[in-house]
Image: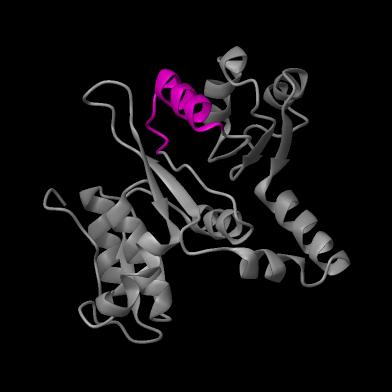
Amino acid sequence: NRREWLQSSHAIMSIGAADVPRGCDATEAEITWILSFAGCKSAFLENASQARKLLSNRASLPILTHIFLFDYSDGGADGELGAALTAAGFELLSFDELAARGAAWRSEHPGKVEEALEAGQAEDLATIIFTSGTTGEPKGVMLSHKNFLSQLPDLATRIILYPGERALCVLPVWHSFERLCEYVILNAAAGIIYSKPIGSILLADFARMNPQLLPSVPRI
């Protein structure tokens, strides 16, 4: 989990599109199945190893056209992998390049993103979260914006956070509880600290940052 994912997710939903989150531990077969079944046209990937999974299964992803890399140094357009992705028909951009293009586009089209936001309806599809696949092929759960937004007023009375306080987050992006907690944190004007559910890392971050909240599961 990382800030770039949250920024991408909000950008996708703000223009009326839906995101389909999955973790980096997904196998080639699993991620290919999910992207194909959900009809994804773009993929936001953490690093080059994730891009190689898609490259290996290009024939199964005919409508996927754009790949955006968070960590671009290990798979940039000038490298061997970048050339292979371009040859396979993908347009490859780093997250920073995408943000720069977005800033330029917004300056040339003032108010367009706000128009898209206003056109959105509560019942519109916001996300498709897939199951782990332990009972066969992963199954996509379709959630609307209302599914998330309807919980925020009540949860604000149960999860007490004040502006400027901090929450330490270790659950993955596709975990529906984690995702809702992130909205609760932002709704409270609090801050998100991304860590990892590994004892040495989690405990060190906890001691250093002294958060007020830790969204968790029993195993952690």
In front: 116, or 198?
116
Q: Position of residue 8 (x, y in %)?
A: 57, 54
In front: 215, or 83?
215
Q: Is residue 31 left or right of residue 41?
A: left
Q: Is residue 45 inside the magenta stretch?
A: no
Q: Residue at x 52, y 22 (%)?
A: 53
Q: For the image shown, how many numbered marks are present on the structure?
A: 0
Question: Magenta: predominant secondary structure element?
Answer: helix
| Residue 66 in view of the camera | yes
Q: Quadrant of residue 99?
A: bottom right
Q: Is residue 35 inside the magenta stretch?
A: yes
Q: Position of residue 68 (x, y in %)?
A: 65, 41
In front: 184, or 190?
184
Q: Quadrant of residue 60?
A: top right
Q: Residue furthest right?
A: 108
Compared to residue 86, the image places residue 206 above or below, namely: below
Q: Residue at x 22, y 26 (%)?
A: 134
Q: Residue at x 78, y 30 (%)?
A: 78
| Residue 212 in view of the camera | no
Per the rendered image, the range of residues in magenta is 23-39
Please say which color scheme the image uses. Answer: one colour
Q: Residue at x 88, y 65 (%)?
A: 108
Q: Is residue 8 left or right of residue 85?
A: left
